[in-house]
Amino acid sequence: MLVYAAGAIRRLAIRDRARRDAHRARSRGKLLRWSFARLGATFIKIGQIASSRPDLFSAGVIAELRSLQDRVPPFSFARAKAIVERELGAPLARRFRAFDEEPVAAGSVAQVHRAVLRNGDEVAVKVLRPGVLAHVRRDGRILLWLAHVAHLMFARARTANVIGHTRDLVAGILSQTDLRREKTNYERFRRDFAATRA
């Protein structure tokens, strides 16, 4: 908030109206991006969706929200290691010959680490963010409650089917936390393209 306030004061010094408006939009976008990233997976997804809506948001806001597509802050390796070891029931050294501490990618729901199995196979290990399932369920309940309130108060919300869209959003995020489904999709992809040369 202090950064936003400082930006607002700095904006007073910008004489050109177009530059001042662009600065304001960028500042608002930074605040939204920071807020969504701090609120977790559900709100990061909302930010990602919002970043594809130039009909609703200014270019400055969209530019900031786009960073939620591919620059989500990772969680610590210590937490990732603890999760993997708990899920596999053994220390990393017993299951992997090597396991990169730095993730190759971090998203709203999970992050991916390169690893080498004991037999030498290179793999990608996808690790769900700590507590992501509980957070998405909690956020989903809150968003559905807000959608019901909007439905009761605004005819436009009823016309837009806010409740249905909110349910779809939450269901979509929850489905991304089911890594077994993703595994099945990867296996199907591998089977379907096994005969294709790289």
Image: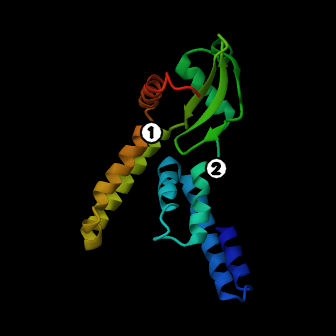
Comes first in the chain, label 2 or label 1 = 2
Q: Nearer the viewer, residue 162 or 131?
A: 162
| Amino acid beneath label 2 | Arg
Residue 154 seen from this side: no
In the rendered image, the quadrant that contains the C terminus is top right
Up the image or down, 173 lies above or below 179; here it is: below
| Amino acid beneath label 1 | Gln
Q: Tell me the SS state at disc 2.
A: loop
Residue bearing the label numbered 2: 71
Q: Residue at x 61, y 34 (%)?
A: 112
Q: Position of residue 183 (x, y in %)?
A: 46, 27
Q: Position of residue 124 (x, y in %)?
A: 60, 27
In the rendered image, the quadrant that contains the N terminus is bottom right
Where residue 176 is drawn, which disc sits there?
A: 1
Q: Position of residue 2 (x, y in %)?
A: 68, 69
Q: Tell me the SS state at disc 1.
A: helix
Residue 36, by quadrant, is: bottom right
Up the image or down, 170 lies above or below 11; here it is: above
Q: Residue at x 46, y 24 (%)?
A: 187
